[in-house]
């Protein structure tokens, strides 16, 4: 699946790079095959285990997985934390596919317009890298409204270090989805613009890091 994704998505993205540089708009489309590819990557990279183990097994609060695709991470969290309430929030077309794919009764699937209530924690894996700064700020701002004041949002994403690999991925994301690889300063600015602050950044598995955010109070 990963090879098919590379051929069908990444290669055409490079082919359209010149048009993007000249100002052409980019529309990132995710379909059922892409859902399965992302789920396979989540399994192979161990990220679902890492995100599930962000929480103690006895955690009994409400956890929301933002942009969690077909729900692999959400199910892993619900299995690891049997007393927790777990919600998955996705775009409408992906939420419909997730409802069909999920069989775990403790994972509720929502869109941003149907999700209600305040969560005790949230996770977001490989979502913001596919968004430009305006859309990323808007999404983070929306998520902020879902969280209790002391909640932590764990963002699993790429933190650029100035190396060639990050630069190449940055260009590919720009052509593919309009997204970006952000360095620590850019992540800090993005978080601040959405009403968050960075608690810490921890390397997980190349090229991903865990960026832990908490809400900034109005006095901060």
Image: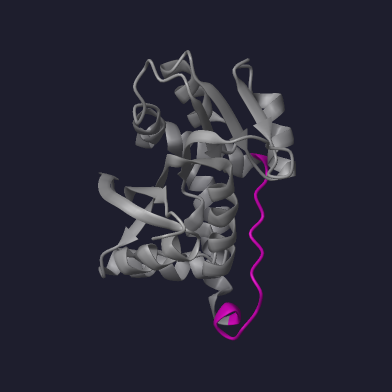
Q: Position of residue 70 (x, y in %)?
A: 60, 33
How many discs appear? 0
94 on left or right of 185: right
Q: Is residue 41 magenta?
A: no
Residue 22 highlighted magenta (yes or no): yes
x 34%, y 54%: residue: 198
Percent from the top left, x then y, of residue 206?
29, 48
Q: Position of residue 114 (x, y in %)?
A: 74, 38
Q: Is residue 17 left or right of residue 196?
A: right
Q: Main secondary structure of the magenta part?
A: loop
For residue 6, above or below residue 120: below
Q: Report whether residue 51 is seen.
A: yes
Along the viewing direction, whichever of 51 and 3 lies nearer the viewer: 51
Q: Quadrant of residue 49?
A: top left
Q: Residue at x 46, y 49 (%)?
A: 126
What residue occupies the far bottom of the structure in this picture?
A: 22
Magenta span of residues: 19-32
Residue at position x 42%, y 55% in the image: 216
């Amino acid at each position: 699946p990963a090879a098919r994704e590379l051929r069908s998505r990444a290669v055409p993205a490079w082919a359209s790079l010149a048009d993007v540089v000249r100002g052409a708009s980019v529309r990132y489309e995710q379909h059922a095959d892409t859902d399965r590819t992302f789920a396979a990557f989540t399994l192979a990279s161990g990220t679902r285990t890492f995100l599930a183990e962000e929480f103690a097994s006895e955690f009994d609060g409400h956890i929301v997985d933002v942009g969690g695709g077909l729900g692999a991470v959400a199910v892993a969290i619900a299995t690891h934390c049997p007393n927790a309430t777990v919600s998955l929030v996705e775009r409408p077309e992906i939420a419909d596919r997730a409802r069909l794919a999920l069989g775990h009764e403790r994972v509720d699937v929502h869109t941003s317009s149907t999700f209600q209530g305040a969560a005790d924690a949230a996770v977001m894996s490989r979502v913001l890298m596919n968004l430009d700064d305006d859309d990323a700020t808007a999404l983070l701002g929306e998520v902020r409204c879902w969280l209790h004041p002391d909640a932590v949002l764990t963002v699993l994403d790429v933190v650029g270090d100035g190396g060639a690999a990050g630069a190449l991925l940055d260009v590919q994301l720009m052509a593919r989805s309009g997204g970006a690889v952000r360095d620590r300063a850019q992540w800090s600015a993005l978080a601040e613009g959405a009403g968050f602050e960075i608690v810490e950044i921890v390397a997980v598995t190349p090229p991903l890091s865990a960026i832990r955010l908490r809400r900034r109070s109005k006095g901060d």
